[in-house]
Image (cartoon, rainbow, N blue to C red):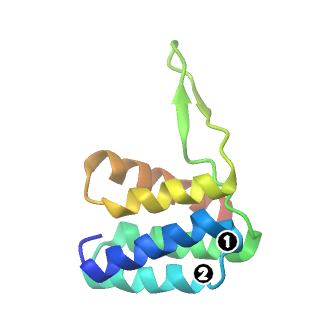
Amino acid sequence: MKIAAANKKLDEVIAKVEKEGLEAGKLIDDLKELREFALKEQDPLVTKVLRLTYEYLGEHNAFEVQAQFDEDDEGNEYPIEIDDKENLLYLLNLLKNAEHKINREEIKDYRSALKLELY
C-alpha cells in the first residue's frame, strides 16, 4: 500500500493477528478500513482481495484458503499446508508491497482462491 496511514493500519492489523490470531477483535472492521485505503489508492486488486478476505472470514470464521502452492521436480503443483493464522499473515504481508510483481501474482492467486471458495 502506498499511503502512509494505510501502511500504519496494515502494520497494526498484522500485529493484532500475530498476537490474537483470527479471533482478533474487530478484525473484519479493520480489513474494511484497509479496503477504504485501497479504494483511495485506486488499486482494484487489493480492494477486491480485502473485501473477499473479510467476507470469507465472516462466513467461515477461518482462513483455510488454498492459494499457496509448491512445485516438485517434475513440475507438479500441490497446495502448501499452512494454518489459518499464518495464511492470513502471509497475505497481509504481501499487501505491504502490493506493487511488487511477484507479490501481485500471489495476491491474484489469493483473489482466485477466495472467489472459488465464496462463489
Please give the residue where the numbered disc 2 appears in the rendered image: 28
**Kind of residue at badge 1:** Leu
Q: Position of residue 82 (x, y in %)?
A: 65, 44
Query: Where on the picture, by quarter, is residue 3?
Result: bottom left
Question: Would you say 107 lies left or right of 115 here?
Answer: left
Q: Position of residue 40 (x, y in %)?
A: 28, 85
Q: Name the residue: 51% across, 13% down.
A: 73
Question: Would you say 90 lies left or right of 8 here?
Answer: right
Relative to 83, does residue 71 appear above or below in the rendering? above
All told, the count of numbered labels is 2
Give the camera-side residue of 97 and 36.
97
Q: Position of residue 116 (x, y in %)?
A: 62, 57
Question: Would you say 80 lies left or right of 23 here?
Answer: left
Number of other residues with Cα within 10 Å of mark 2, as a class: few under 14, some 14 to 19, many 20 or more: some
Kindly check if marks 1 and 2 are in contact, taking CB atoms under 8 A apart as contact.
yes
Q: Name the residue: 39% across, 62% down.
A: 95
Relative to 97, does residue 27 appear above or below in the rendering? below
Q: Name the residue: 43% across, 58% down.
A: 93
Question: Which quadrant would the N terminus be assigned to in this image?
Answer: bottom left
Query: Where on the picture, by quarter, is residue 79?
Result: top right
Is residue 92 visible to the viewer in this orientation of the structure?
yes
Helix, strand or loop at label 1? It is: helix
Residue 57, label in figure: 1
Q: Position of residue 48 (x, y in %)?
A: 45, 72
Question: Which quadrant would the C terminus be assigned to in this image?
Answer: bottom right
| Residue furthest front as drawn | 19
Helix, strand or loop at label 2? It is: helix
Relative to 72, does residue 51 appear above or below in the rendering? below
